[in-house]
Image (tube, rainbow, N blue to C red):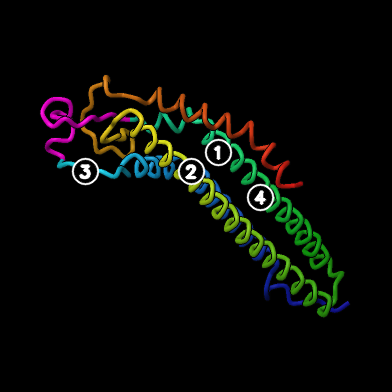
Amino acid sequence: MRGVDREENNPLKSLKSLIKNLKTQNMKMKAVRNGLLTLSVAACFAACQNNEAPAPKQSNIEAPAQKGSGLKIAFVLIDTLTNQYELYKDAQEKFQKKQANAENTINEKGKSFAAQVQSFQNRVQKNQITQEEYNNEQARLGKFQQDIQDLQTRLSNTLQEEYAKELQTLTDTIQSFMKSYAKEKGYDFILCKSSGIDQVLYADEAYDVTEEVVAALNKRYAKDKKNAPKKEEKKSK
């Protein structure tokens, strides 16, 4: 049986390339997941600052609030809010499951590719394949590799799109609630304190309404969650 040129387009090079791409893509997926909390904090920060009244100058944001200006101000600890808000917890859990499923799909494809490359390489080393068979199998494995890379891209894009929708839902919910909460309590401003994004250098704990806001948000979310099956049932009729 005639030997083949094993140096040209070596399938092991394709395998190494795929493994590198798998690691890179998994890191991107994890970055998307880990970014959920960071961007949620940023979104909540924007939500809290989204009041109809114009923002005062930084020099008199807090100290004159209850004394001379007549402004009523409170603040929310956003890190605490996102950690305790059940809507965020559910969104994070759902996203992590989807990410894990995507990673498992890609990993299984990668294992299959690796096994096929190894089988092909064994046949080549034993000189059990013709040049034509080598070329055909090389082309097939190349296409398989490209298909996996395309799948990686599609899954990653889908995850990011779904994440964006979840983030928008979280942002809209908090914005809506904070407006009604501020109006009900008579607050002119509700500020945000966060370990990562913080424009409040000091705030007396007496103005901390985080616990009350979290409790109210979770109460409303629990009600919406309970009524969700009924709404779906009405739609199906």
Residue 11 falls in which quadrant of the image?
bottom right
Q: Which residue is mark 3?
A: 55
Q: Which mark is residue 36?
A: 2
| Residue at image coords 69%, 50% | 107
The CA span between labels 1 and 3 is 32 Å
* First-in-chain label (4 vs 1): 1
Task: Please state the horizontal and vertical placement of residue 3, each as a whole percent of the image.
Answer: 81, 76
The CA span between labels 4 and 2 is 17 Å
Please rate how many residues cluster around mark 4, counting C-alpha atoms within 10 Å: few if below 14, some from 14 to 19, many from 20: many
The CA span between labels 4 and 1 is 15 Å
Q: Which residue is mark 4?
A: 102
Q: Main secondary structure of the magenta part?
A: loop
Left or right of residue 29: residue 11: right
Please rate how many residues cluster around mark 2, counting C-alpha atoms within 10 Å: few if below 14, some from 14 to 19, many from 20: some
In the image, residue 176 above or below residue 5 = above
Task: Please state the horizontal and vertical placement of residue 196, each as a whole percent of the image.
Answer: 33, 38
Asked if the residue under mark 2 is in contact with the one under mark 1, i.e. CB atoms within 8 Å, the reply is yes
Residue type, numbered disc 3: Ala
The stretch in magenta equals: 58-75
Q: Which residue is mark 1?
A: 92
